[in-house]
Amino acid sequence: MVHQYQNNGYNIVLDVNSGAVHLVDEVTYEVIRLLEEGKNEEEILQELSSRFPVQEIRESLDECAQLKKAGVLFTEDIYEKSILDYKARRTVVKALCLHIAHDCNLACRYCFAEEGEYHGRRALMSFEVGKKALDFLIANSGDRRNLEVDFFGGEPLMNWQVVKDLVQYGRSQEKLHNKNFRFTLTTNGVLLNDEIMDFCNREMANVVLSIDGRPEVHDHMRPFRNGKGSYDLVMPKFKKFAEKREKEASGEKTYYVRGTFTHHNLDFSKDVLHLADEGFTKISVEPVVADPSEDYAIREEDLPQIFSEYDALAAEMVRREKAGKGFTFFHYMIDLTGGPCVYKRLSGCGSGTEYLAVTPWGDLYPCHQFVGREEYRMGTVDEGITRPDIVDEFKGCNVYTKEKCRNCFARFYCSGGCAANSYNFHGTIQDAYDIGCELQRKRVECAIMIKAAQMEE
């Protein structure tokens, strides 16, 4: 299976199963298209000879034959044959999303967590519950040494002392159990101060800073509960933190400014570039996922404009990189040299199996977006996993069990998409969020184009 497209002047051919990317001239682009359609050499010569010299067509055919022999064009799918082994694989828990605070000091209009309540009540996680969560992670991680813990909310800084105490406890357990904790934090920045910045630079492997871009965009969607915008308060703090992070933190520690675009700012590339112009070098601005009845929801008719924005952003990123002003955009960061292991290619984030979310009172869910849905409550930090059937359900979910994924060229990059989005739109984790699929395919194309431009350089 191959995927062909043209972007910013490049003729690009992706061999889906091997992941090989080819930049080709026009004649080879057409030859590959006809080979994919099942045409033989004579049929191809007959169809293309009015447009290209016969000798060039024959050379392209020879080159395609060599690439196929080398295993980088028209390759077979070797992963589907491993599906039974994949479903039977042993899984261990390697990451927890700790809902340290089911409360928030902002009232973001698109918040899936209902300002931190998650279909339930406002609450802060106690140290005792958090300690049990870390103990559960250690006990259920098998021989895995590197473990991840994300402090999430609501707004985690509203429960800052417990965050610090849990980090200290986790560090105290590392040598005892031969584990290494990688802590991360997501914050809206309202309570960010120098003491928190210094602690994060010492202890947090990644910090996600929530900001949507231009002041008017951010303030419209991320106000305080009194309606006042939050941009002017958080932007100076985020800039200071990013500067400190890049100067003081070790090479293994990073950050992201992470925004959300909606139907109200379909020109979101301007928000990405605004953040870059403010000095941020690690940026993620993602499409909102919302009920179609919401006025800010992304609609199918928005897709052409969004596609144009992704193309424009990719082209501008290439220009800035050449000018020495490059930055990374999360959705354009793909590995063309091998990518993730086969299991991650098939199943994605590991929600419900390797990655779980923990509520302030200690309930376990497949991920933060399932929290509050009683049908997906998997157990507690005291009892452990009491619903192994949910684990099995998620373990059996992969790109070959989803009909929309089987023949999608992007399946090994998105790994089947978000299970929560599938459930929210279709009532099952074995489907896919259609608008999300369209956007993911476009982002993969743009990401490969950027890699192509780098290869050309």
Image (tube, grey):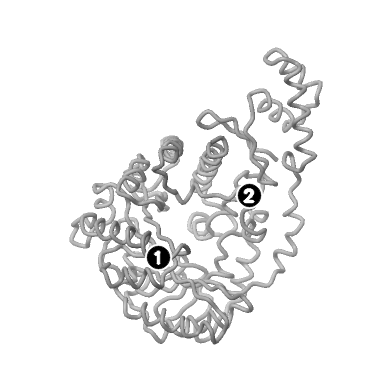
Please state the total of marks drawn on the protein image: 2
- Residue annotated with mark 2: 337
**Residue 27 spot, x, y in % from top left:** 67, 23
Residue at coordinates 44% horizontally, 37% vertically from top-left? 322
> To which quarter of the image does residue 139 belong?
bottom right
* Residue visible at 78% across and 21% down in the picture: 43
Upstream in sequence: badge 1 or badge 2: 1
**Mark 2: which amino acid?**
Thr
Question: Residue 67 at what x, y percent from top left?
Answer: 75, 37
Q: Position of residue 22 (x, y in %)?
A: 65, 36
Q: Quadrant of the C terminus?
A: top right
| Res. 302 in view | no
| Separation (CA) of disc 1 from disc 2 | 28 Å
Mark 1 vs 2: CB contact within 8 A: no
> Residue 430 vs residue 216: left or right?
right
Q: Nearer the viewer, residue 289 or 52?
A: 52
As helix, strand or loop, the secondary structure at mark 2 comes to loop
Label number found at residue 186: none
Q: Amino acid at mark 1?
A: Ala
Q: Which residue is mark 1?
A: 249
Q: Which quadrant is the N terminus positioned in? A: top right
Q: Is residue 209 above or below residue 177?
A: above
The answer to whether one can see residue 277 in this image is: yes
- The residue closer to the viewer here, 129 or 193, is 193
Q: Secondary structure at mark 1?
A: loop
Q: Find residue 401 and report its image quarter.
A: bottom right
* Image location (x, y in percent) of residue 259: 36, 53
